[in-house]
Image (cartoon, grey):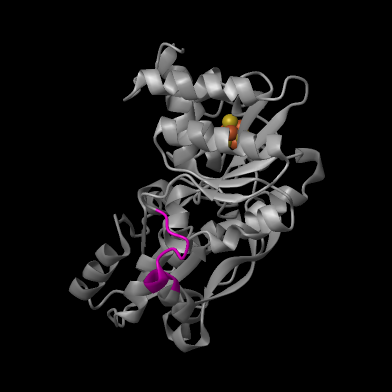
Amino acid sequence: MTENLKFRDPELTRRVAGKIKEIAPRKDTVKICHVCGTHEWAITHYGLRDLLPPSVEVIAGPGCPVCIVPASEIDEAVQLALKGIVVTCFGDVLRVPGSKMSLLDAKAEGADVRIVYGVNDATKMAKKERSSQFGFFAVGFETTTPSTAVEITSKPPSNLSFLISHRVIPPAMKMLVKMKDLNLNGFIAPGHVSTIIGLKPYEDFPGVYHMPTVVAGFEPLDLLFGIYMILKQLKEGIPRLENEYARAVHWEGNPKAIELMEEVFEVTDGNWRGLGTIPSSKLKLREKYAARDAHLRHDVKVEYGVDLQPGCRCHLVVVGKIKPTECPLFIETCTPQKPVGACMVSSEGTCRIWAKMITRKN
Ligand code: SF4
């Protein structure tokens, strides 16, 4: 076992890793994709890839919500800030590059950009400072969307509007399946997102695309069990939808959160950084809540911007076509301290996770 392992149950971990080796194909290779930044963190941090036989590869898909916000939507937030609106956002959004500048650059130019830990912080600020207009830059997958929906339906102060950049995960998984050169054999579905949406939205993966799909938790053993369950399905030749994370994820998800999301948002096509348009993958405010839309209220309009900085390969990293170490800028000119691409900015970005691990080892 790798030396950086600090498993809660080393013996059981060893046994599950042994079972994976037993069941893994001898000749063919198997490519399993996860779509969650926390999964990538756990896999990298615990060195789980080192426990897998060479025939089993686990790749990271677009699981970092900050990494996939296109430059044009950062540009919208920047435009809002430069118009004198107080822009509130999560800390890891601050340094994500837009086509010309990041929100941090806008702040350096005098714009009022504030980090919040949750949308309710934005509400509190707006309530306190009634003479200013506030905008909350809502970034995230289904895990964070319900809290935005709660705030919008809770009659927030009239000087608060919302710049919605929420995305939904299953359409991105469909895009990965359809990338023929990716040759996926199975999915580890995201644990956090699934606590909200449940299992139903993944039914097509085994049913239509013949893709074994297992929702997994975040402990090393969860992930190893998830990988084992996928390999077992492949061996049996019967793709199924299974739930390894039954202690937190239920078939129906969180019905109240789903209802709230459906009340506030409708699904539309959305651009993902470097990947172009993914059908039905973005959320927008329903007509009923248009008065809260920062675009309309503050006349925010931008062109579709350039997503990738010169030399950046984030568009290949986010779909697992290359490893971060295969980007020529990795650690050379792109570092966690001075990120070039979005995948190096957020703590959930694959490049940042790999960079932190490598610099820790050295
Ligand atoms: S190392 Fe930096 S430039 Fe290269 S893909 Fe990752 S984030 Fe983009």
Q: Nearer the viewer, residue 194 or 92?
A: 194
Q: Please say whether residue 50 is visible from this viewpoint.
A: yes
> On the rendered structure, is 323 left or right of 293?
right
Left or right: 123, with 336 as reference point: left
Q: Residue furthest front?
A: 236
In this image, 282 relative to 193: left or right? right
- Farthest residue, direction right: 180
What is the x, y in percent for residue 179? 77, 47
Report ligand 1 position as a quadrant.
top right
* Residue 150 is covered by the magenta coloring: no
Q: Residue at x 70, y 57 (%)?
A: 207
The rendered magenta stretch, by its main secondary structure, is classed as: loop
Q: Quadrant of the C terminus?
A: top left
At a point 32% along the width and 73% down the height, the residue shown is: 151
Of 229 and 334, the residue lying toward us: 229
**Residue 105 % position (x, y):** 44, 48
- The structure residue drawn at horizontal position 29% and vertical position 80%, both measured from the top left corner, is 154
Residue 253 is a magenta residue: yes
Magenta stretch bounds: 249-258
